[in-house]
Image (cartoon, rainbow, N blue to C red):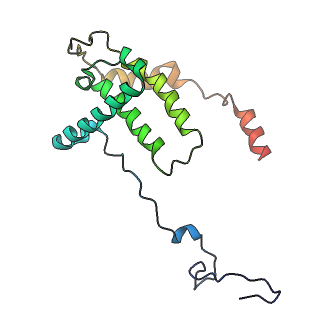
């Protein structure tokens, strides 16, 4: 229906708050895209049945990974799933891959960023003690987090007690803030 100046303006049914007259964001009325919940990929927090299911899912993806990127075979041993640290790194790559290639990924360079992360991460999964034919259990080292030593360090060491200095990028941050 044309307004007083003759323009045909479509009705804004549902886009105006009837109480305040405020124009609502039309995105509020669109159906939300279903998001993939990846918060459950914390191995230690999974129930055993879920852990086994997720490990099988990760295994399928790892098989895809080595077929798609054969160079990963020089770093990845068949016993990868028996090493928690390797499993965590592969999980991070997998979850990131799912987010990158899922519909609705909003970064223009997400795929390139993921591939870059792959090339940076895979060399870290190489296991010196294992080969393609033989698994060796990782040597467990005890982590000693001494409360007394921590308290002393936090109260008397120079790196904890020195006076704060100006942020080394302060001038650039101020300059950038002024430009905006």
102 over 21 or under it: above or below: above
Q: Is residue 100 visible?
A: yes
In the current view of this chain or complex, which residue is farthest to the right?
5
93 over 136 or under it: above or below: below
Question: Which quadrant would residue 15 be assigned to in this image?
Answer: bottom right
Using the image as rendered, state which of residue 168 and residue 31 is in the foreground: 31
Residue 73 locus on image (x, y percent): 36, 18
Relative horizontal placement of residue 28, taking residue 126 as reference (left or right): right
94 over 33 or under it: above or below: above
Relative horizontal placement of residue 30, taking residue 135 as reference (left or right): right
Residue 108 locus on image (x, y percent): 60, 43
Question: Which quadrant would residue 41 be assigned to in this image?
Answer: top left
Question: Which quadrant would residue 35 be assigned to in this image?
Answer: bottom left
Q: Going 46% across and 63% down the picture, which residue do you hit?
A: 32
Q: Going 36% across and 46% down the picture, which residue do you hit?
A: 38
Q: Is residue 75 visible?
A: no
Using the image as rendered, state which of residue 41 and residue 107 is in the foreground: 107
Using the image as rendered, state which of residue 140 and residue 88 is in the foreground: 88
Point out the image quarter for the N terminus: bottom right
Residue 59 locus on image (x, y percent): 27, 32
Relative horizontal placement of residue 73, taking residue 112 as reference (left or right): left
171 over 98 or under it: above or below: above
Residue 44 locus on image (x, y percent): 25, 36
Count up the numbered dots.
Answer: 0
Q: Going 74% across and 44% down the picture, which residue do you hit?
A: 177
Q: Going 39% across and 22% down the picture, which residue do you hit?
A: 152
């Amino acid at each position: 229906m044309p307004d007083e100046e003759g323009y045909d303006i479509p009705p804004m049914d549902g886009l105006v708050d009837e109480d305040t007259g405020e124009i609502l964001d039309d995105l509020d009325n669109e159906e939300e895209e279903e998001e993939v919940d990846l918060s459950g990929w914390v191995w230690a927090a999974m129930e055993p049945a879920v852990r086994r299911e997720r490990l099988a899912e990760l295994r399928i993806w790892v098989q895809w990974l080595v077929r798609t990127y054969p160079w990963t075979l020089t770093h990845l041993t068949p016993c990868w799933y028996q090493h928690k640290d390797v499993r965590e790194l592969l999980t991070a790559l997998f979850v990131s891959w799912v987010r990158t290639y899922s519909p609705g990924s909003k970064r223009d360079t997400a795929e390139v960023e993921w591939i870059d992360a792959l090339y940076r991460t895979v060399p870290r999964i190489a296991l010196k003690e294992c080969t393609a034919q033989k698994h060796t259990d990782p040597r467990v080292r005890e982590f000693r987090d001494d409360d007394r030593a921590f308290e002393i360090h936090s109260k008397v060491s120079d790196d904890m007690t020195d006076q704060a200095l100006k942020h080394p990028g302060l001038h650039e941050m101020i300059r950038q803030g002024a430009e905006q």
